[in-house]
């Protein structure tokens, strides 16, 4: 799992409940517990033997070869130039989190629970302003040196001072990490929004103080790092492949949280210049696992000989997580895109219904919400609880927030819906843009131009009809295709007009929302606030989500936030499907139970030696 998804996917509630009895009190007055959760009891008691979705009898060994499927944090999809994914510099290699352990680890059949990994127990102070962790006494780095509280505190200081902006945003309100003894570290908090912080710091990687005292932390490097995790980097071919090999001496292999996990002897990520090249490589067996994100390929391309004779198996598995925020993010930092009316007009030029039929074989649904596929999605008009949160900001948000929630326009599926284009033209006129001699211009006679930044030609088939409709509005729109390295740099610098991105929302959102849509992140280089959202009402509603002490309150706050975001027209939503489309060469086995909130492949599947032998024959 990538850093963004691990760091910014966790929270702990002010009023969490834990079932195990306290052995004693921690130095901060809290009770030592084997796990932490957000709302309600933990599923697993202190004596649990393994997660229900993990098979403790799974054999170890064999190889998993796969291609990076999405870009997380500063990890590249088409290439990489650094093994350091914890800083802003460079395009990071995939799988690096497998080299590092965290204080606690997530249970993927609970929406927000964590259990002890490096730490055997955690204790939240009665006033919720600190969390203590008691470390296990047998944790070692890959070089055999012991991990101590000094390493944990050092890691926090290093990340807070030099870490990636996604990390520094998440730990902004963590005041300090203090070493109490070799096995005990205390994190103290400041401010009022402390609910997320115990879970956030529990999910930080742990670095070696000795190693990073001798090696520069914030540099791009192809030198394998020193970690404590189940895997180590064993082979690096820059920009082409990276291999992580299972550490036979891994200190944590017998822990309950790890039983049945990390079964592959090696995991190799294969990089390709584009998705088409990657697909052809999969067909020829260069790698063995693929999640298909291109609906046209899924509907029409999986009929090659290896599929028809059974050597490759296609699977569709449910995805119960919120479907995320895939869409075209409009950079409001650009003067001509700062008006929400202009941004709303652009959405009327995209014909999803035609696109879904012509290109996606009707496999997708239209994304409407920032919290799509979840109970946090706003619908209809605000209820009384939502209104109570929204009323204080009536002067800071559009009037439409208090009416029916905004949904994207529905076309006649013709590809060139005149009614939708007329609405777009009228909205642009209201915003001061008129067509003169076929060109859309403002009062200063400046033409309206729009550049779609992309690092892959795959999207051109979707973009070209969109661009054609924009041209009918007098907009000079074009695609700027750049290489992967330039794309990442322009992304970090917000050097684009409009860009396609997908960000996953977690089951219990919290402090990570600041990085997606908070005002501070809007001006922070490399942040996930691509649209440049900067609105005090949105900041306040993010706080409401973050400080919620019950799931009911959290859902209400998220729906209110969703309404304001959708009324701001910061993105043109694209599409989603609540399932995974997977294709695998038939050499793998998996547990009978799939974790509800995770795909589970890298950490839970294993090589079936009989299947592998048959496949090789």
Image (cartoon, rainbow, N blue to C red):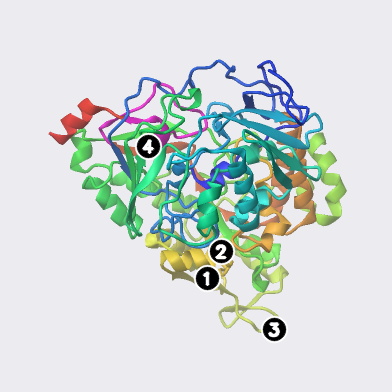
Give 136 or 92, whichever is nearer the viewer.
136
Q: Which residue is mark 1?
A: 451
| Mark 3 burial class by Cα count in 10 Å: few <14, some 14-19, many 20+ | few
Disc 1, SS: strand
User: Where residue 326 sits in the image (x, y, percent)?
Assistant: 54, 50
**Which is in the foreground here, disc 3 or disc 2?**
2
Q: CA distance from mark 3 to mark 2?
A: 31 Å
Q: Residue at x 61, y 29 (%)?
A: 113
Q: Based on the picture, tell me whether residue 602 belongs to the magenta stretch.
A: yes
Q: Nearer the viewer, mark 2 or mark 4?
A: 4
Which of the two residues, 450 or 116, is positioned nearer the viewer here?
Answer: 116
Range drawn in magenta: 585-606
Q: Which residue is mark 3?
A: 444
Residue 9 placement, left or right of 29: left
Q: Is residue 30 above or below residue 325?
A: above
> Which residue is under mark 4?
247
Above or below — where is 34 with respect to 364?
A: above
Q: Give the CA distance from mark 4 to mark 3.
A: 64 Å
- Mark 2 or mark 4, which has the lower sequence index? 4
Relative horizontal placement of residue 131, taking residue 418 as reference (left or right): right
Mark 2 = which residue? 492
Please, what secondary structure does the residue beneath circle 4 have? loop
Q: Are marks 3 and 1 in contact (CB under 8 Å)?
A: no
Q: Residue at x 55, y 61 (%)?
A: 349
Q: Decide which of tag 4 and tag 3 comes sooner along the chain.
A: 4
Between label 4 and label 3, give the one nearer the viewer: 4
Of the two numbered discs 3 and 1 on the same chain, state the one appearing first in sequence: 3
Q: Secondary structure at mark 2?
A: helix
């Amino acid at each position: 799992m990538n850093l963004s998804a691990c760091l910014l996917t966790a929270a702990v509630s002010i009023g969490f409940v834990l079932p195990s009895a306290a052995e004693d009190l921690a130095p901060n007055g809290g009770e030592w517990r084997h796990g932490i959760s957000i709302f309600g009891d933990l599923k697993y008691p202190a004596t649990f033997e393994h997660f229900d979705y993990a098979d403790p009898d799974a054999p170890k060994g064999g190889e998993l070869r796969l291609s990076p499927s999405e870009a997380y944090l500063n990890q590249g999809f088409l290439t990489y130039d650094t093994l350091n994914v914890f800083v802003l510099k460079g395009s990071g290699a995939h799988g690096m989190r497998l080299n590092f352990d965290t204080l606690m680890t997530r249970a993927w059949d609970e929406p927000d629970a964590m259990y002890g990994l490096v730490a055997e127990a955690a204790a939240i102070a009665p006033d919720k302003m600190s969390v203590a962790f008691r470390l296990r006494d047998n944790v070692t780095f890959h070089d055999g040196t012991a991990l101590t509280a000094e390493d944990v505190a050092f890691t926090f200081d290093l990340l807070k001072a030099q870490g990636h902006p996604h990390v520094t945003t998440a730990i902004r309100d963590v005041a300090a990490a203090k070493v109490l003894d070799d096995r005990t570290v205390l994190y103290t908090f400041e401010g009022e929004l402390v609910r997320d912080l115990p879970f956030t710091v529990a999910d930080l990687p742990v670095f070696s103080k000795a190693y990073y005292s001798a090696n520069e932390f914030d540099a791009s490097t192809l030198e394998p790092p020193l970690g404590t995790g189940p895997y180590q980097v064993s082979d690096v071919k820059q920009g082409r492949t990276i291999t992580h090999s299972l550490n036979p001496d891994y200190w944590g292999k017998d822990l309950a949280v790890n039983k049945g996990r990390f079964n592959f002897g090696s995991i190799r990520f294969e990089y390709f210049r584009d998705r088409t090249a990657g697909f052809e490589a999969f067909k020829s067996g260069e790698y063995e696992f693929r999640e298909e994100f291109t609906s046209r390929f899924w509907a029409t391309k999986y009929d090659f000989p290896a599929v028809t004779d059974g050597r490759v198996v296609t699977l569709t598995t449910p995805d119960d997580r919120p479907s995320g925020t895939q869409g075209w993010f409009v950079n409001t930092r650009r003067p001509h895109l700062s008006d929400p009316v202009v941004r709303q007009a652009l959405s009327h030029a995209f014909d999803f219904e035609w696109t879904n039929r012509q290109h996606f074989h009707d496999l997708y649904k239209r994304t409407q919400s920032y919290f799509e596929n979840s109970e946090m999605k706003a619908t209809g008009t605000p209820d009384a609880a939502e209104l109570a949160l929204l009323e204080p900001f009536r002067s800071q948000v559009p009037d439409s927030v208090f009416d029916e929630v905004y949904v994207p326009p529905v076309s006649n599926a013709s590809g060139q819906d005149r009614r939708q284009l007329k609405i777009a033209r009228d909205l642009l006129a209201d915003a001061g843009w008129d067509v003169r001699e076929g060109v859309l211009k403002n009062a200063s006679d400046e033409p309206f131009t729009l550049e779609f930044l992309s690092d892959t030609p795959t999207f051109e088939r979707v973009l070209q009809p969109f661009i054609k409709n924009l041209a009918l509005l007098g907009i000079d729109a074009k695609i700027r295709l750049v290489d992967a390295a330039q794309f990442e740099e322009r992304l970090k610098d917000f050097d684009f007009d409009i860009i396609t991105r997908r960000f996953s929302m977690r089951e219990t959102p919290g402090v990570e929302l600041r990085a997606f849509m908070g005002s501070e992140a809007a001006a922070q280089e490399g942040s996930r606030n691509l649209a440049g959202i900067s609105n005090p009402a949105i900041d306040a509603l993010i706080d409401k989500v973050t400080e919620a002490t019950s799931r009911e309150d959290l859902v209400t706050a998220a729906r209110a936030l969703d309404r304001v975001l959708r009324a701001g027209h910061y993105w043109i939503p694209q599409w989603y499907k609540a399932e995974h489309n997977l294709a695998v060469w038939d050499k793998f086995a998996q547990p009978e139970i799939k974790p509800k909130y995770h795909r589970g492949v890298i950490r839970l599947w294993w090589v079936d030696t009989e299947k592998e032998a048959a496949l090789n024959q």
